[in-house]
Image: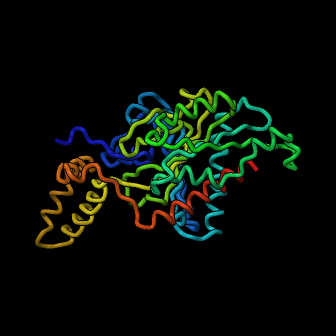
Amino acid sequence: MFKNYSVRTDLAIEEKERFESDNVEIPGVVLEEEYDEEREMRVTRVEIETENGAKAMGKPTGTYLTLETPNLAMPDEDIHMEIASELCRYIRELIDKNCEEQTGDLSVLVVGLGNRDVTPDALGPYVADHLSVTRHIVKEYGKYAMGIEHANMISAIVPGVMGQTGMESAEIVRGIVGETHPDVVIAVDALAARNSRRLNRTVQIADTGIHPGSGVGNHRSGITKESLGIPVIGIGVPTVVDAATIVNDTMENFICALESSDSLKGVGEVLRSYNAGEKYEFVKELIAPHLNGMFMTPKDVDELVHHISHTISEAINMLFS
């Protein structure tokens, strides 16, 4: 019954945690973690170094940087500027790593993936709205029109979703890349998480690109280095979890309550004997079929997505200004 355990998540750190919960080490996958207690900021680096590691994780080889902080959900401008500064540093690290042969100023295309009309999926378009685009100025008047010696060319596109355009986002981006010849693409998208505590509190930055819609089971063509021919940096924030995750988290709390009860302690111990995969699949079977394809998002997602989109766009603006 439990052999096909599959967590619905876009976060590499959650895939790694799934194996750790079963006490399984994955050859070719390295995890490093830093925690700043004063700023309540945790940064986790997952390096998938081999094809075997990639197969086990279900993700391409590459570097996945995950920044987690509850402050991301707080409407405090000073805190968000601090987070933006950290994001800027990690985006720069991955760009430097993947654009080593590039000398001089960069031409960067930022792709805001998602549906502007669906708030949990509007992160990418909102980020694109707040960017300081410069390609048209540099092309028309030269970099000295910017008043600085080094002027990166920043352009942005919101390709929409297939239901709006009839085209894959990857097809649109591939056409733009062929015409404008950027050095690197930064793709921003909303993600799905396995842990509800990570909703709108986590940013993942990866040098493996992005697969639009994969988090909600709507698999579309990937925007990756292999499909575009240039490096692609993916930036994502989990804004939704599936219904099974909510029920599974509730079940965890229920088990803890049973274990603290003298009369029901035995029942709690029996349920605790299931590993994470078994409990998750058990929950999925219990809620099927009516809730199995449902995704949840916080009630204040409108405000959160606006705050976070400003933070990510500010990080990109800092990097290339």
Q: Would you say 53 lies left or right of 224 here?
A: left
Residue 116 visible (yes or no): yes
Q: Quadrant of residue 142?
A: top right
Q: Would you say 53 lies left or right of 305 here?
A: left
Q: Nearer the viewer, residue 191 or 195?
A: 191
Count every numbered label the image shows and give the total: 0
267 over 225 or under it: above or below: below
103 over 191 or under it: above or below: above
**Residue 301 percent across, percent down from the top left:** 46, 63
**Residue 285 percent across, percent down from the top left:** 18, 49
**Residue 35 percent across, percent down from the top left:** 54, 59
> Residue at left 30%, top 59%?
246
> Residue at left 61%, top 54%?
312
Looking at this view, name the residue that lies furthest to the left. Answer: 263
Q: Quadrant of residue 180?
A: top right
182 over 82 or under it: above or below: above
Residue 44 visible (yes or no): no
**Residue 297 percent across, percent down from the top left:** 39, 60
Q: Nearer the viewer, residue 229 or 134?
A: 134
Quadrant containing the N terminus is top left
Is the image coloured rainbow, by chain, by secondary structure, or in one colour? rainbow
Q: Nearer the viewer, residue 8 or 298?
A: 298
> Residue at left 50%, top 39%?
210
> Residue at left 83%, top 43%?
150
